[in-house]
Amino acid sequence: EAQVTQNPRYLITVTGKKLTVTCSQNMNHEYMSWYRQDPGLGLRQIYYSMNVEVTDKGDVPEGYKVSRKEKRNFPLILESPSPNQTSLYFCASSYNGNQPQHFGDGTRLSIL
Amino acid sequence: AQSVTQLGSHVSVSEGALVLLRCNYSSSVPPYLFWYVQYPNQGLQLLLKYTTGATLVKGINGFEAEFKKSETSFHLTKPSAHMSDAAEYFCAVSGGIGSGNQFYFGTGTSLTVIP
């Protein structure tokens, strides 16, 4: 089954404690992306990757890091999380940057 | 950068009535256009897409959208609303001038269907 898998689905943590949200896709997609969803703001792109070792900033990259060492994986790293990063996060993938994206089920992060 | 405007953050329709959700984008060059639906506590699912070709695009669950270049619009319609259509709907664009390979989403429209 084609899918994008994110882990964890839910996480409550404290300010400053480094965390990583994993994302994996099994569709051999080249394009992967991270979004955050906040009420009234829709989805905003954090980072995206066109292929292995190629990453670019989206609209809201501050406070986040990503890496793309393998085609299937695109982890999101919060080195020093802050409360304003409390949000619902989605990973997505697609064949390329102009094709429909397949979304994971989301990760709800709460940073106290 | 692109911008995507969805007019009306909340839309209510009666069951069986026409659904019209509005989306306008900012690029002067036709981008790629998408509508997604999000049910509570779920990820986003693709409803339909416009890339090239026919400007009237049909999607899943009876939805369709028409790309109008002159109006820079991509409004979503469904002739007859069903209770199961209650969800959040997002318009998205990629491509177009100034967008590179980024995806831009609108702020969403929450659809309520009244029995």
Image (cartoon, grey):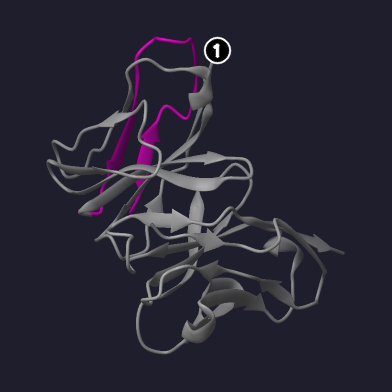
Helix, strand or loop under label 1: loop
Residue B38: % across, % down? 58, 53
Check residue A20 for magenta coloring.
yes
In which quadrant of the rendered view does residue B6 lie? bottom right
Above or below A30: residue A52: above
The quarter of the picture where the N terminus of chain B appears is bottom left
Q: Nearer the viewer, residue B29 or A2?
A: B29
Q: Which residues are magenta?
A: A1-28
Q: Which residue is mark 1?
A: A112
- Residue A17: quarter of image: top left
Residue for point 80% across, 77% down? B17
Q: Could you tell me the amino acid type at mark 1?
A: Leu
Rendered position, A65 above or below B91: above
Residue at the right extreme? B115
Label 1: few (<14), some (14–19) or many (≥20) C-alpha neighbours in 10 Å: some
Q: Position of residue A39 (x, y in %)?
A: 63, 41
The quarter holding residue B8 reads: bottom right
Instruction: Give the mark count.
Output: 1
Nearest the viewer among B102 and A93 is: B102
Horizontally, residue A59 falls left or right of residue A111, namely: left
Left or right of B85? Residue A70 is left
Identify which residue is drawn at 42% across, 64% down. Answer: B93
Q: Is residue A76 above or below residue A78?
A: below
Q: Residue shown at 59%/72% (left/top)?
A: B61
- Which chain letter goes with mark 1? A
In the rendered image, the quadrant that contains the C terminus of chain B is bottom right
